[in-house]
Image: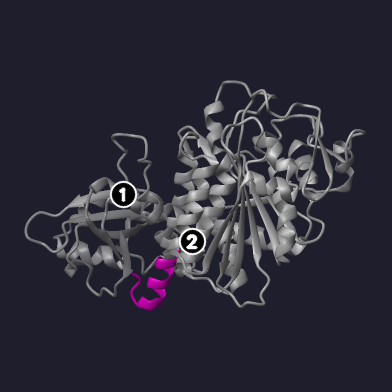
Amino acid sequence: MEIFARKITDADKQTTGCAVAPVFARKTLSRAARNLDKANGGLISNALKNGEMAGDIGEILMLHIHGDKPVRRILLVGCGKPAKLDANAGRKIVAAMLRGIKGCKTRDASVHLEELHSDKLDLPELCEFLGRSAAMATYTYRETVSKPKRALAVARISVNCGEVLSARKVSSALKRGQQLGDGINVARNLGNLPGNICTPGYLASEARKLAKAHSKLTTRILEEKQMRELGMGSLLSVSAGSSQPAKFIQMQYKGGKANQKPYVLVGKGITFDSGGISLKPGAKMDEMKYDMCGAASVFGTLHAILAMKLPINVVALVAASENLPSGTATKPGDVVKSLSGQTIEVLNTDAEGRLVLCDALTYAERFKPAAVIDIATLTGACVVALGAHATGLYSNNDKLAEQLTRAGESMYDRAWRMPLWDEYQKQIDTPFADIANVGGPGAGSITAACFLARFTKKYHWAHLDIAGSAWTSAPKAATGRPVALLTRYLMDRAGV
């Protein structure tokens, strides 16, 4: 799909399959709608008089043009009261526009946004969100279905912002949004793949493909033998019951200056999580293919920043493994040694995410990072605490936490900071090792973060628990979160 800016003076004279025009509350027409109404004999005003639309936010009305006219259809989109236009209203308006465009099956559309700006609604941000949403609307899962669901099939969308913004600024915002949307789609598709396709080896091959396509990206894959030689006993304890070998994936993007410290993203890549010997209940176990959505978000973020060519250095680490029961699987009560040298009593093999992450977080030290962010579908407790709306955010640095929170708010990919107090640390003490991998029934998301905190004392670190935000159960689908949050955070660090 091509989405671009175009200066349009007369909305009725541009040849298009569908002209998208705002209508405000109390049936007030925008400039584009008035122009189209006059050119078509009062078609729009008559429809409004007949009560077919009021102009409330999110309303849509499709009008078909008869005869030989440049505009074949008019999509009216309700925008509410101009004084109440804000970012939330803008998101609803964009969603309504794309829903209408998808419904009419046109191959091209012209969207008129020139009056959709206010003190609370930034037009470049609206254009970026339109580009992102349009790209996301083109996605549908295809890999293992014979008849994929229909996605947005429009080939071209032109966007008119009138004299409010230059065409260059509009095009830049649209392109940036589209690149972000494409990255989100990468994460969605990886998450949606079944576990028999998206294995640790599959993720490793995707990393190699990405490096081949981009000269500034290098990929290195550590096999189990190399991990064992390094001392990554915690990570390897998770893959011990699977016939699929674990992979430790390192992707390094050098877009900034050679002396700039990199930002490190660490993704949990459990491509299927049965719980191991601490077997999960059978209901909804199929959704445990989504336990690699942290890794998927790292891949998606890399896709976005590579497309944007951000002037920044980024290292992506993915700890990929399956967690399955067998005669060789790790047992509850076993003690393993991590890369850091700390020993861990594995009280519950279903608390495996922190076991692969702790070795990855220790490995991150060698890059002398500016900051490290891990992303993981880590705990059901986070879902209980925050539901699906917010990602759980933990950090050992207030500034980093604030930067991530702000990035999430601006992209509507929100995170909520949770406590990381020393008082919780005693819950993961054990007499048989340096640390236990679970801390009892209370504050499960917090004690999981406390576990990771013991391996991150040498740098600024944040942990994003996406167990509630990474996928939906009805319908079952990966969301691609928190690619938008992470990309915005890196854009801010790069000064974009």
Quarter of the image for residue 113 reads bottom left
Is residue 240 or residue 363 the one in the foreground?
240
Q: Quadrant of the N terminus?
A: bottom left
* Label disc, if present, on residue 75 of the rendered structure: none
156 in relation to 434, above or below: below
Q: Amino acid at mark 1?
A: Leu
Q: Quadrant of the C terminus?
A: bottom right
Is any part of residue 238 visible from this angle? yes
Q: Which residues are magenta?
A: 159-176
Q: Is residue 103 magenta?
A: no
Farthest residue, direction top = 282
**Residue labelled with disc 2:** 211
**Residue labelled with disc 1:** 152
| Mark 1 residue crowding within 10 angstroms, few (<14) / some (14–19) / many (20+) | many
Q: Which mark is first along the chain, 1 or 2?
A: 1
Residue 416: x %, y % from top left: 68, 50
Residue 247: x %, y % from top left: 59, 46
Q: Is residue 174 magenta?
A: yes
Question: Is 375 left or right of 4, judged from the image as shown?
Answer: right
Question: Is 466 left or right of 146, judged from the image as shown?
Answer: right
Q: Amino acid at mark 2?
A: Ala
Is residue 28 or residue 268 the one in the foreground?
268
Is any part of residue 391 visible from this angle? no
Residue 191: x %, y % from top left: 50, 42
Disc 1, SS: loop
Quarter of the image for residue 273 reads top right
